Image (tube, grey):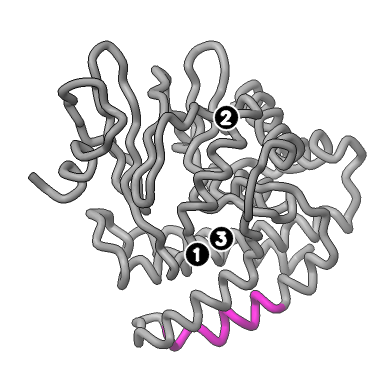
Amino acid sequence: MNPALERIHSLPCWRGPITPEPLGGGITNLNFVVRDGPRRYVVRVGDDIPVHQIMRFNELAASRAAHAAGLSPAVVYAEPGATVLDFIEARTLAEIDIRERPMLERILSLVARCHRCLPCHLRGPVLAFWVFHVVRDYAHTLEADDSRWVPRLPTFLKRAADLERAVGPVEIVLGHNDLLAGNFLDDGRRLWLIDWDYAGFNSPLFDLGGLASNNALREEDERWLLEQYFERPLDDGLWRRYQAMKCASLLRETLWSMVSEIHSALDFDYRSYTEQNLTRFETAWQAFEQT
């Protein structure tokens, strides 16, 4: 039996014999669906990942707050390295789903509730997530590990500094900070937002930019998104700050993958993911330079 399955079987929360089955999709931890009698649960197995600034105490606090706010499944049991959540019978969204305006309207409502309601339910210490610090830290890691990307780091850091200046002062909310399509579930009645590995206090522009860049939204939908979220007409200043944060979110995802090429043992094609996100970043950077 592999270590993850041994860990799951050893958890004290089960009422009887269990049947764990691998659940795909995780690229920072291992996920399983576990049947315990008539009920099913999702078990997330993974320790802290300091190189990605993932701290499981922070993930757990955000997960519990998200459930209290009505956004995410309940945490049934947790201990260091393993979290057990209620299983939701639902469809995982794809990028093409999010690009449909009716779905985007539902998602925007969910994200706004995350930003505005979660802080009321948080308990204990919670991290901040400032993308420009993350990018600089990733650059240090890549240099220390003699990554194949070291020659490109000065350019990345120069662009990050330009983007940080363009973003300027920010409003602070509790961000999810990883709005990939796979982190949204649709059970036919409502949407759920899952996987709080990177949750932390941040600018709302990061989630909005990440939502757009991760799911290839059209510019007209991006402009609609900003006007609906901020409840006012979009001006050139907000559009430029948003474009800067969207670029930063893509740069962070690119460097995340570069670091994962070296540090992750999970079965995932990080090299292809790096190339995909680097292409998206370069496209977004060119658009930003024209704003």
**Callout 1: SS:** loop
Which three-letter amino acid code belongs to the residue tagged 3? Leu
Figure check: 101 above or below 274: above
Give the CA distance from mark 1 to mark 3. 17 Å
Figure check: 219 above or below 258: above
Which three-letter amino acid code belongs to the residue tagged 2? His
To which quarter of the image does residue 133 belong? bottom right
Q: Nearer the viewer, mark 3 or mark 2?
A: 2
Q: Does residue 225 appear anywhere in the picture?
A: no
**Callout 3: SS:** helix
Q: Is residue 284 left or right of residue 262?
A: right
Image location of residue 206, percent across then percent down: 67, 54
Q: Nearer the viewer, residue 62 or 93?
A: 62
Q: Nearer the viewer, residue 87 or 99?
A: 87
**Callout 2: SS:** helix
Image location of residue 58, percent across then percent down: 54, 52
User: Is 74 included in the stretch rendered in magenta?
Assistant: no
Check residue 250 in the rendering and tell me which mark sits there, or answer none.
Answer: 3
Residue at the image position 60 percent from the left and 34 percent from the top: 66
Other-residue count near label 1 (Cα within 10 Å), few / some / many at <14 / 14–19 / ≥20: some
Residue at the image position 54 percent from the left and 42 percent from the top: 215
Q: Does residue 258 appear anywhere in the picture?
A: yes
Residue tagged 1 = 53
The mark nearer the N terminus, 1 or 3, is 1
Q: Which residues are magenta?
A: 150-161
Residue at the image position 49 percent from the left and 75 percent from the top: 138
